[in-house]
Amino acid sequence: MNSLKYKLTSLLEIIPQGEHIIFADYPVYFNIGDLLIFQGSENFFRDNNIVIDDRFSLKERSQLSRSAVGDRTIVLQGGGNFGDLYPWHQSFREHIVRQFPDNKIVLLPQTIHFSDKAKARESAAIFRSHKNLHICVRDEKSYQFAVNFLSDKVRLLPDMAHWLYGSSAFKPATRDAAKGTLWLIRGDKEQPQASHVAESPVQDRDFQGDWNDLQKFSAPFLEQWSSKFHRVAGMAPVRVVRPWKMYLPMVRSIIEANVNFFSKYERVVTSRLHGHILGALLDKEIVLIDNSYGKNSGYYECWTKALPNVVLSANGA
């Protein structure tokens, strides 16, 4: 895990220490995986003396102007929404690439997946047109797609959440204090085949749900409030309010609540990539089930296969 964390320092060859950046597309929704990526990115920038001059969520798209950015590097949040499954985020990235042809743009580690070849070609044409675009990807399949179709500046790197390893909030609990099994199974468009989970043994399912089920204990009303606050702030014609100043402490508290919840369990069975990564950060025994299009298995083969406490299973057995 420490080795995976420090592989991320190769980003400093693209974003040197002391550089001033604009950080865009941070998540204003409580998918814990995306929040872990966000916090890992924030910690990486802080620890390596990279200065974030401003942050823009998708809801503040209209304020991300040339005057607001200047000649600074634009860094885009990593994750698993590059492609046509999540069109709002893909559209935002494409908008930035078109609007800022002279700025250096860096995409933090992403998984790439298109189900529509025509959309893949359209998006590729936009990204290829930019001459200073650096794309970081999280698996071999995404790497090959990016090299062949998107840019000549592509890096294969682990997820930004790995930078959280060893931080005070992620000290693994003693094995004696953790009991039982946590089942974290996707219930969205990336969910695995139903039979994979249905056929799995039901014993020791001390908790079963998805990220939204875990939020029942961590003030779910905060998600609606923060979303509305960002949207209203983003409607202003000029940059007056910076919602991230209030949002960052909220992100830390939500992550802390979920770390505490995970820490109670000895074993994690999950089809969520960041259920897997969070479990690894906490030194849990992990059974990883693939998602609908192979994102989890691709990541496992590339990065976490060597971890002794992680097993990839077709059905969670």
Image: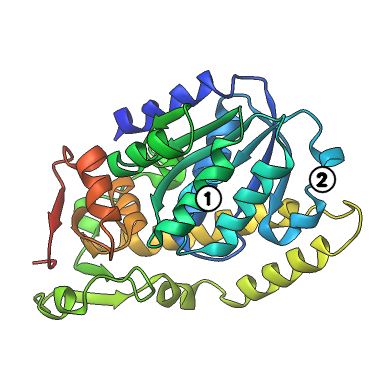
Helix, strand or loop status at disc 1: helix
User: What x and y, as percent, mark residue 155?
Assistant: 41, 29
Q: Quadrant of residue 85?
A: bottom left
Label placed on residue 185: none
From the viewer's side, name the closer residue of 205 and 171: 205
What percent of the width, then of the height, locates residue 221? Answer: 62, 77
Question: Picture quarter containing residue 110?
Answer: top left
| Amino acid type indicated by mark 2 | Ser
Disc 2 versus disc 1: distance between alpha carbons? 22 Å
Lateral position of residue 43 relative to residue 210, left or right: right
Please say whether residue 268 is visible from this viewpoint.
yes
Asked if the residues shown at circle 2 and circle 1 are in contact, with their CB atoms under 8 angstroms apart, the answer is no
Q: Where, quadrant-wise, is the C terminus in this rendering?
A: bottom left
Label whose residue precedes the other's in the sequence (2 or 1): 2
According to the image, label 2 marks what residue?
65
Q: Nearer the viewer, residue 160 or 151?
A: 151
Mark 2 or mark 1: which is in front? 1
Quadrant occupied by the N terminus: top left
Q: Is residue 283 visible?
A: no
**Amino acid found under the numbered disc labelled 1:** Ser
How many residues crowd mark 1 within 10 Å: few (<14), some (14–19), many (20+)? Answer: many
Q: Which mark is residue 123?
A: 1
Q: Looking at the picture, how far across and down is residue 81, in whole percent? A: 47, 56
Which residue is depicted at the point 37% across and 62% down? Answer: 115
Is residue 290 or residue 217 the one in the foreground?
290
Q: Give whichever of 138, 310 is nearer the camera.
A: 138
Lateral position of residue 23 relative to residue 233, left or right:
left
Residue 161's place in the image compared with 265, above or below, is above
Q: Residue at x 65, y 75 (%)?
A: 224
